[in-house]
Image: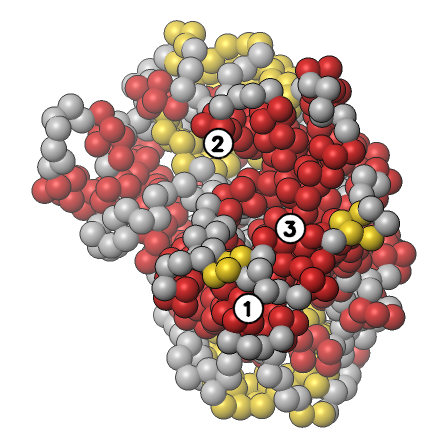
């Protein structure tokens, strides 16, 4: 093993029209190193990865592999150079089998006129086995998102790569799957493969990586050894300002005995969960933790009438609710924000104003069933201002906004009906640190005004930092409740998995 | 119809750019671009042919797309909701054949026409049922309906055209008469277009069409009953086809069982040239009408220039391809 860098980026720049996405950035990746790349959304991480992966061409600067300058003209060239890129967004052929997806590059390069399925399955089996027991003859469309993510990673592993780029690989993974991925990354490292690891999660970066490079606004900020820096320091470099307090103050303990706003009794849906009881007090932020697939979203959606309940009851403000559809729930003051922002949260190609008013058109409808567009514009403008949505105007389509601002628009939609209870499913998934802090503050402000808030989250620091109380769901049932004094990562993981975590599963955990 | 100020207002719903001024410009670009192309074509033709710039020719052109224009309105709304209807040509014919047959059986033509329109709506309802309850997609459902309904037309007429010269003159006037020199056909067309253009921009019910077409899941998560929306839009499109069929019957004084074959392609092309997206979520009535006007001006020009009728389809197809490519290019540049 030499100490010569496997990959070197020198003075790389890229502009899209007048927008400079990257200006003169650098990065150095050593052999067998796990190198974290951090930066807020829009910092230029993806642009850089796309240039290394051959998707985009740089305007200036050079890319060196093993000290030799190279031009990466296409993704195929990148593969030949030994660079494998796992995108954050899943790019698999949904109708093909796992094996066909994993071996796509090999099939593409194959000269023989006929397919050799035996070989394809064997090879895919070999790659998949290291990660998770996913049958390789399954159609990708039949897998959960987290399994699909694992298939993406397995696909990259089959390429004989020197450099593996992982872009937010754990965003859709459960805690156990993430742990398995970490051990694979450590294994790759031993085999001399270098990994660029893009993530927003400080705990992961600090337990897995050797060095960290921070970008901000398309510029290089610093590279530090993990051993000689701290999460706070990295966050500070990312946002370029001091974030004094990541999470807002919690509810004062004496105020926690407010009136019960929402109470759910013995709720079941007949398939995914059973006998769920929960109470939410006015002014409280209640967290719901648990593994992906444990039934958290299903419970929330059933409470709101987005799914059918088989038994049980829901009462709001002491009054029993009969909810036949989500529209009934909205009328009663109970709203739900979906975890899948682009898929079911916002209308990307419609304007901000049209997005905000989608939940209650009746309120904006005047005589003859016509929409009062002045009222619509006023409502959107005032909510956008209140939430600090950074936008060109309320007529701009939501697709022009950053992820964090899109999420604010989705929240504005919920607030437009002045809800009593808001249920938020993964409210800050894929959002940069700055916007995350703003959304957390907003939720706390709403709670202080007496709104009841339920936050479903897979991010343990968020549950611990933001919520007053956390319920953990395991296999469709409430596994336990953790009050203010009992909130820590280990307790949540224990309840979520139902087993005592072994020391091997416990990385160095840092709360952010 | 060409109200430039109103095209800017479409932008409120169908925003397409980063700021009010620039997205309004971009949104209206499709309509403005079409108007420019149509005007340029008209000016060029006025030099090429002395017959082009006459009231007679314009009237003929307007007449030629007025009835189809009514179907275009329904198709555009259906495209916005994310659907498509390949059966419109067959339904136009069915409405015509049913009304004609009922008239020949002794029913008065007005009642016969209402029944014709009602059965067209019923076909829409059946398609809506298969799309929303059974869960098939619009393309396949309407493809099947296109063939089935055409078959019904042949069954009812036994394959021979119904001669309806006995229709009373006050009924034929719908298709042949005029008021102060303006044909009723054109008046009906303008009224239908004006009503639906206005409703699509302003009515709450039609806003739900945009939500559903833009992101059906997000619409459901906003409490919108998207299946209801899709059902009624499907019914609306078929109903407007039925209306067009009755007007055709009054105009021709006959009901031919093969009438309207291939019409759906012209109609979809017009809506798409006018800016409707096959993915749903965007489109305007005004744009779609400009689209069909453009196709009509081209057809008329080709005839006046004595270009063989065999070339017409090829040229229309090229225009469709050019319009969609231009739009794709503009969208790609924006994002």
Q: Is residue A198 above or below residue B315?
A: below
Q: In this view, does A75 lie to the left or right of A62?
A: left
| Mark in the foreground, 1 or 3 | 1
Residue under the point 82% across and 64% down: A370
Q: Is residue B105 left or right of residue A70?
A: right
Residue under the point 51% across and 81% down: A308
Distance from disc 2 to disc 1, alpha carbons, whole Å, reads: 31 Å
Do marks 3 and 2 share a subunit? yes
Distance from disc 3 to disc 2, alpha carbons, whole Å, reads: 20 Å
Residue located beneath label 1 in the image = B99
| Mark in the foreground, 2 or 1 | 1
Q: In which quarter of the image is residue B23?
A: top right
Q: In which quarter of the image is residue A239?
A: top right
Residue under the point 72% across and 91% down: A318
Distance from disc 1 to disc 3, alpha carbons, whole Å, reads: 17 Å
Q: Do the residues labelled 2 and 1 touch (CB within 8 Å)?
A: no
> How busy is the neighbourhood of tag 1: few (under 14 within 10 Å), some, or many (20 plus)?
many
Q: In this view, does A248 lie above or below B40?
A: below
Q: Which residue occupies the foreground of this view, B231 or A141? A: B231
């Amino acid at each position: 093993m030499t100490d010569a860098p496997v990959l070197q980026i020198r003075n790389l720049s890229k502009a899209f029209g007048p927008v400079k996405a990257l200006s003169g950035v650098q990065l150095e990746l050593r052999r067998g190193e796990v190198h974290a790349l951090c930066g807020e959304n829009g910092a230029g991480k993806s642009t850089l990865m796309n240039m290394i992966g051959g998707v985009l061409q740089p305007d200036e600067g050079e890319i060196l592999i093993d000290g030799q300058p190279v031009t990466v003209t296409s993704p195929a060239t990148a593969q030949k150079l030994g660079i494998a890129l796992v995108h954050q967004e899943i790019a698999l052929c949904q109708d093909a089998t796992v094996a066909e997806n994993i071996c796509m590059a090999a099939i593409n390069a194959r000269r023989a006129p006929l397919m050799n399925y035996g070989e394809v399955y064997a090879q895919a089996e070999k790659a998949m086995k290291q990660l998770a027991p996913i049958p390789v003859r399954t159609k990708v469309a039949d897998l959960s998102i987290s399994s699909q993510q694992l298939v993406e990673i397995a696909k990259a592993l089959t390429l004989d790569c020197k450099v593996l780029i992982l872009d937010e690989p754990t965003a859709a993974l459960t805690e156990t799957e993430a742990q398995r991925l970490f051990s694979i990354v450590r294994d790759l490292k031993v085999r001399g493969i270098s990994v660029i690891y893009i993530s927003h999660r400080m705990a992961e970066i600090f337990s897995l990586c050797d060095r960290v490079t921070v970008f901000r606004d398309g510029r290089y900020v610093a590279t530090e050894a993990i051993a000689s820096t701290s999460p706070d320091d990295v966050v500070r470099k990312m946002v370029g300002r001091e974030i004094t307090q990541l999470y807002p103050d919690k509810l004062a303990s004496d105020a926690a005995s407010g009136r019960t706003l929402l109470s759910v009794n013995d709720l079941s849906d007949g398939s995914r969960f059973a006998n769920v009881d929960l109470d939410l007090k006015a002014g409280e932020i209640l967290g719901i933790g648990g593994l992906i697939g444990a039934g958290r979203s299903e419970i929330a959606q059933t409470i709101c009438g987005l799914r059918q309940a088989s038994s049980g009851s829901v009462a709001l403000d002491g009054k029993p609710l009969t909810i036949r559809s989500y529209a009934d729930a909205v009328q009663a003051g109970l709203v739900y924000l979906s975890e899948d922002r682009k898929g079911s949260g916002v209308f990307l190609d419609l304007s901000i104003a049209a997005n905000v008013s989608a939940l209650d058109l009746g309120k904006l409808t005047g005589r003859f069933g016509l929409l009062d567009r002045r009222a619509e514009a006023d409502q959107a403008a005032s909510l956008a201002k209140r939430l600090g949505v950074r936008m060109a105007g309320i007529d701009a389509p939501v697709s022009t906004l950053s992820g964090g601002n899109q999420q604010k628009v989705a929240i504005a939609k919920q607030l437009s009906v002045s809800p009593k209870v808001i249920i938020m499913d993964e409210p800050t998934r894929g959002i940069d640190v700055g916007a995350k802090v703003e959304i957390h503050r907003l939720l706390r402000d709403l709670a202080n005004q007496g709104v009841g808030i339920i936050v479903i989250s897979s991010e343990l620091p968020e549950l611990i930092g933001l919520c007053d109380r956390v319920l953990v769901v395991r296999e469709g049932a409430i596994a336990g409740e953790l009050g203010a004094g009992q909130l820590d990562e280990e307790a949540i993981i224990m309840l979520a998995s139902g087993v005592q975590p072994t020391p091997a599963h416990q990385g160095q955990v840092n709360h952010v | 119809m060409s109200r430039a100020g109103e095209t800017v207002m479409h932008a409120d719903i169908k925003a397409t750019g980063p700021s009010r001024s620039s997205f309004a410009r971009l949104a209206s670009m499709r309509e403005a671009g079409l108007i420019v192309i149509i005007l340029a074509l008209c000016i060029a033709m006025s030099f090429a042919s002395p017959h082009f710039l006459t009231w007679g020719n314009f009237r003929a052109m307007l007449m030629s797309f007025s009835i189809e224009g009514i179907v275009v309105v329904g198709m555009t709304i259906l495209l916005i909701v994310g659907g498509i209807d390949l059966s419109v040509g067959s339904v136009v014919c069915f409405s015509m054949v049913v009304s004609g047959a009922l008239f020949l059986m002794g029913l008065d033509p007005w009642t016969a026409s209402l029944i014709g329109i009602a059965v067209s709506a019923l076909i829409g309802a059946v398609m809506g049922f298969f799309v929303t309850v059974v869960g098939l997609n619009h393309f396949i459902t309407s493809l099947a309906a296109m063939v089935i309904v055409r078959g019904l037309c042949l069954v009812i007429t036994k394959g021979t055209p119904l001669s309806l010269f006995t229709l009373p003159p006050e009924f034929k006037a719908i298709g042949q008469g005029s008021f102060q020199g303006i044909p009723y056909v054109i008046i009906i067309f303008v009224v239908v277009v004006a009503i639906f253009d206005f409703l699509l921009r302003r009515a709450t019910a039609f806003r739900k069409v945009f939500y559903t077409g833009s992101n059906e899941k997000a619409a459901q998560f906003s409490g919108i009953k998207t299946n209801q929306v899709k059902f009624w839009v499907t019914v609306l499109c078929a109903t407007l086809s039925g209306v067009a069929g009755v007007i055709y019957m009054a105009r021709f004084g006959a009901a031919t069982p093969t009438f309207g074959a291939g019409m759906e392609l012209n109609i979809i092309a017009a809506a798409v040239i006018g800016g409707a997206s096959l993915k749903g979520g965007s489109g305007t009535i005004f744009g779609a009408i400009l689209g069909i006007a453009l196709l009509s001006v081209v057809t008329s020009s080709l005839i006046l220039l004595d270009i063989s009728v065999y070339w017409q389809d090829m040229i229309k197809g090229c225009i469709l391809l050019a319009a969609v490519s231009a739009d794709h290019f503009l969208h790609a540049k924006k994002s």
